[in-house]
Image: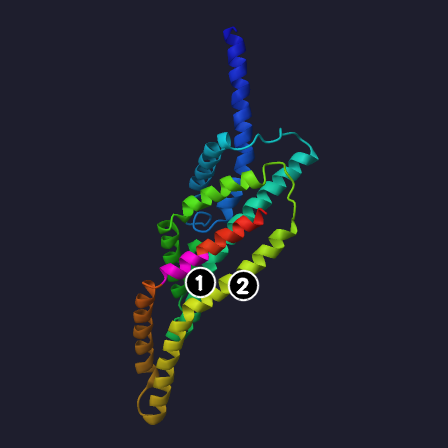
């Protein structure tokens, strides 16, 4: 085999590898775009792109051979299927973080911090309460502490074994079934985290309400607001040590729901 033939074969192998990476990039990029923390504005677009390309290139040699790319309807449908599947998996994981945001909003009502809003880059730049942001950041730290980012890569790799590129989804309605079920779990976990602090803050607020009726000359706002803030922050510090167990269970349920999307 002469040098020209060898270069031609090497070039064909390179183009085949680049094509396989492109197929993997559709699903991996969609997952990272919708995933929590990584898919937010706090991570620059270039870093997300480099991370998606690196993961796709690392997974490509382990994946089944994708169908050839062509300018036809089948390729367009395959691309749409890859993007939809990736966004669905990432969205399920992002829903888990909304439990912390819900708990923070519920607790902020009793702490008189519901008015404390600021732009939250972790949730797309939308306005969020400071207590909800605290829970979101805490869950983000636990996400990496529990090696959930490695479990995310494992989920992506497993998705290609369950649904290779080009294979139609056997039950498209599974996505519409799994996501609402997990949303109910998120709401339950968020309320469960917030209930102890909410009850304690309710007792504090009722106590100062009774005090204001017993001693009208005392200003309940001037005394009760600092007391509510102090008690709320104290309870949040105590809650920090108890947050790991329910959050870990929530992450396990989130990955279970993401695996459930694959059939």
Residue 162, compared with residue 260, is above or below; it is above
Q: Against 252, is 130 above or below? A: below
Image spot of residue 253 (x, y percent): 48, 56
Residue 241 appears at what percent x and percent y? 31, 63
Q: Within the magenta stretch, is there residue 219? A: no
Compute the Cα span from label 2 to label 1: 15 Å
Label 2 SS = helix
Residue 78 left/right relative to 220: right
Picture coordinates of residue 252, whole percent (x, y): 45, 54
Name the mark on residue 233.
none
Give yes or no for residue 246 being in the magenta stretch.
yes
Which residue bears the numbered disc 1?
101
Q: Quadrant of residue 105?
A: bottom left
What secondary structure do most residues of the magenta stretch adopt? helix
Check if mark 2's residue and mark 1's residue have beta carbons within 8 Å: no
For the point 54% across and 63% down, which residue is it?
Answer: 184
Of residue 253 and residue 149, the one placed in the foreground of this image is 253
- How is the protein colored in the picture? rainbow
Count of marks overlaid on the render: 2
Q: Earlier in the sequence, mark 2 or mark 1?
A: 1
Is there any visible trace of residue 9 in the rendered image?
Answer: yes
Residue matched to label 2: 184
Residue at the spot 49% in from the left edge and 66% down from the top edge? 188
Residue 109 place in picture, x, y as percent:
42, 73
The reply to whether residue 125 is visible in this rendering is no
Magenta highlight range: 243-250
- In the picture provided, is 61 more to the left or to the right than 164? left
């Amino acid at each position: 085999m002469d040098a020209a033939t060898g270069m031609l074969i090497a070039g064909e192998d390179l183009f085949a590898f680049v094509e396989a990476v492109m197929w993997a990039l559709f699903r991996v990029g969609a997952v990272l775009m919708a995933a929590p923390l990584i898919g937010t504005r706090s991570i620059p677009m270039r870093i997300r792109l480099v991370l998606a390309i690196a993961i796709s290139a690392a997974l490509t040699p382990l994946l089944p051979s994708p169908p050839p790319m062509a300018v036809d309807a089948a390729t367009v449908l395959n691309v749409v299927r890859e993007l939809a599947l990736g966004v669905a998996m990432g969205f399920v994981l992002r829903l888990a973080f909304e439990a912390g945001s819900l708990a923070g909003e519920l607790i902020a009502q009793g702490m008189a911090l519901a008015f404390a809003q600021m732009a939250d880059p972790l949730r797309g730049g939308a306005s969020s309460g400071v207590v909800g942001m605290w829970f979101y950041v805490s869950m983000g730290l636990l996400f990496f502490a529990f090696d959930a980012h490695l479990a995310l890569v494992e989920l992506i790799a497993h998705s290609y074994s369950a649904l290779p590129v080009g294979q139609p989804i056997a039950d498209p309605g599974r996505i519409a079934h799994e996501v609402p079920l997990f949303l109910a779990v998120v709401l339950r976990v968020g309320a469960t985290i917030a209930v102890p602090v909410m009850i304690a803050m309710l007792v504090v607020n009722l106590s100062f309400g009774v005090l204001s009726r017993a001693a009208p000359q005392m200003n309940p706002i001037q005394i009760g607001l600092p007391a509510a803030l102090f008690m709320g922050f104290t309870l949040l510090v105590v809650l920090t040590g108890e947050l790991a167990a329910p959050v870990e269970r929530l992450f396990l349920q989130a990955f279970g729901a993401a695996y459930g999307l694959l059939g």
